[in-house]
Amino acid sequence: MTPASADQPPAAVVTGAGSGIGRAVARQLLAAGFRVALAGRRSGPLEESAASHPSALCVPADVSDPDDVARLFRTVAGEWGRLDLLFNNAGIFGPAAGVDEIDLADWNATVAVNLTGAMLCAAEAFRLMKAQQPQGGRIINNGSIAAHAPRPRSVAYAATKHAVTGLTKSIDLDGRPYGISCGQIDIGNASTEMIDALGAGGGALQPDGRRLVEPTFDVEEAARAVVLMATLPPQATINQLTITASGMPYLGRG
């Protein structure tokens, strides 16, 4: 990613930066020379992720709240004057339920974070990237293996992650005239608290009804993949990247 000038490093926003993939990505971007705004609902975990790095900016924000999202990007614009990268990472797994069982409030809460939140952040980032000089930037959406093959009883999560793929493609298309690219990374079983919780109680539920302790891989490898996408020159884009734990049920999940 080319910065605005030789003496100004690129500026990034990472949502869901208080834990898991977001924390790992924020730290690796900081190590790669980015200025990084870490966004999440709680200030304490954001401060832990930032680890007092001089190029880190912690901005508590709920991505499902349009006012919070607007404030986040106003803060970034005010501090750094531009935005070069958004890693749209905030997400929740939602309830374990089939389509005939899910409570509407739980459905709406999952959609609000995983899809509407991603759209709100992308919209604010797009506006900044479109208006700034030099124009352009990169948006990376965190999809999921569930964007390709759902787990059993994950209707809300799977539906939102499939929708993120459409969001990614639409942003990339609409961004062409302005030098704004959008790609998606789909991560399978990076070792995080979410994956650990999924595997508790005998393992993850499989389509045949069994429970299986699935392979995982170090979350730092997923972060490295995001940094690879983020640091390509503007002339190159990874439209979609899938990274999984070796041997996890994915291609033969069903």
Image: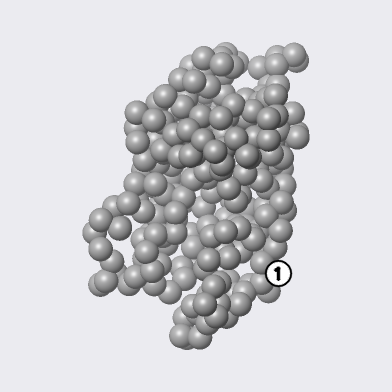
- Does residue 31 sit above or below 244 in this rendering? above
Estimate how packed mark 1 is, as few (under 14), some (14 to 19) or many (20 or more) residues with alpha carbons within 10 Å: few
Residue closest to the eye, 127 or 88: 88
In the picture, measured across the screen, residue 153 lies left or right of residue 75, that is: left
In the picture, measured across the screen, residue 152 lies left or right of residue 191, that is: left
Name the residue rendered at 41%, 38% in the picture: 62
In the picture, measured across the screen, residue 84 lies left or right of residue 7, that is: left
Q: How is the image coloured?
A: one colour
- Does residue 118 sit above or below 68 in this rendering? below
Image-quadrant location for residue 45: top right
In the picture, measured across the screen, residue 10 lies left or right of residue 117, that is: right
Name the residue rendered at 39%, 30% in the picture: 68
Looking at the image, how many numbered discs can be counted on the residues?
1
Judging from the image, what secondary structure is the residue with disc 1 in? Answer: loop
- Name the quadrant of the N terminus: top right
- The answer to whether one can see residue 189 in this image is yes
Residue closest to the eye, 176 or 129: 129
Residue corresponding to mark 1: 246
**Residue 192 x/y as whole percent:** 61, 58
**Residue 27 x/y as whole percent:** 69, 39
Image-quadrant location for residue 196: bottom right
Q: What's the amino acid at mark 1?
A: Ser
Name the residue rendered at 62%, 25% in the picture: 11
Name the residue rendered at 53%, 66% in the picture: 197
**Residue 129 x/y as whole percent:** 52, 23
- Does residue 87 sit above or below 91 in this rendering? above
**Residue 59 x/y as whole percent:** 51, 29
- The answer to whether one can see residue 166 in this image is no
